[in-house]
């Protein structure tokens, strides 16, 4: 898998599997929130997912190898999708059971965010290559 296809592949995978994936990943995110806060799970859910989304996006920004980028992309997409799900549940935008549209929206948001970051990383990398001093005839 090429380095530039990782974000597209992961977000497309989350998008395709959104009806089943939302149920599985939503339960995983709910269990993660339950571990952190038993009593205030609904109040803290979207805040925890937002924090974990930011941490995983930061991990995506600093990732250098393909494995790190793959892991950061999976985590960022997972946490962004769960953030959209729990935020919509907390704000009473949808009833309190799972709907695929939350994961579809989360997949699109994570695709946009990660692609923008990836584009800025390639622009900075290209600028650094141009500004690198040339040695001799090379």
Image (cartoon, rainbow, N blue to C red):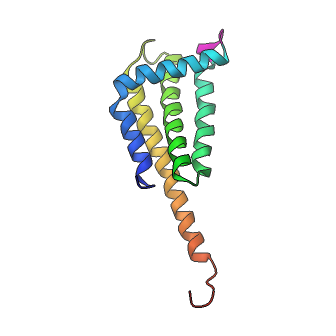
Numbered label tally: 0
Residue drawn at the location 34% of the way across and 23% of the way down: 19
Front-lying residue, 75 or 96? 75
Q: From which residue to which does the magenta span run?
A: 38-43
Residue 129 at x, y percent in the picture: 57, 72
- The quadrant of the image that shows the C terminus is bottom right
Residue drawn at the location 55% of the way across and 53% of the way down: 65
Front-lying residue, 126 or 113? 126
- Please indicate whether residue 7 sits to the left or right of residue 59 in the image: left
Does 8 appear above or below 77? Answer: below
Residue 39 magenta-highlighted: yes
Residue 62 at x, y percent in the picture: 62, 51
Residue 93 at x, y percent in the picture: 45, 19
Does 85 appear above or below 76? Answer: above
Residue 137 at x, y percent in the picture: 57, 91
Does 68 appear above or below 17? Answer: below
Residue drawn at the location 58% of the way across and 35% of the way down: 53
Q: Residue furthest bottom?
A: 137
Residue drawn at the location 45% of the way across and 33% of the way down: 106
Residue 21 magenta-highlighted: no
Front-lying residue, 63 or 117? 63
């Amino acid at each position: 898998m090429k380095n530039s296809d990782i974000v597209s592949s992961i977000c497309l995978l989350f998008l395709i599997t959104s009806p089943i994936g939302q149920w599985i990943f939503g339960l995983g995110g709910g269990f993660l929130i339950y571990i952190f806060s038993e009593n205030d799970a609904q109040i803290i859910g979207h805040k925890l997912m937002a924090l974990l989304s930011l941490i995983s996006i930061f991990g995506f920004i600093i990732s250098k190898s393909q494995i790190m980028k793959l892991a950061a992309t999976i985590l960022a997409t997972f946490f962004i999708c769960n953030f959209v799900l729990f935020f919509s549940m907390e704000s009473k935008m949808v009833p309190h059971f799972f709907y695929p549209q939350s994961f579809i929206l989360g997949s699109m948001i994570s695709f946009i965010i990660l692609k923008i970051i990836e584009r800025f990383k390639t622009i900075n990398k290209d600028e650094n290559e141009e500004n690198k001093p040339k040695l001799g005839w090379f």
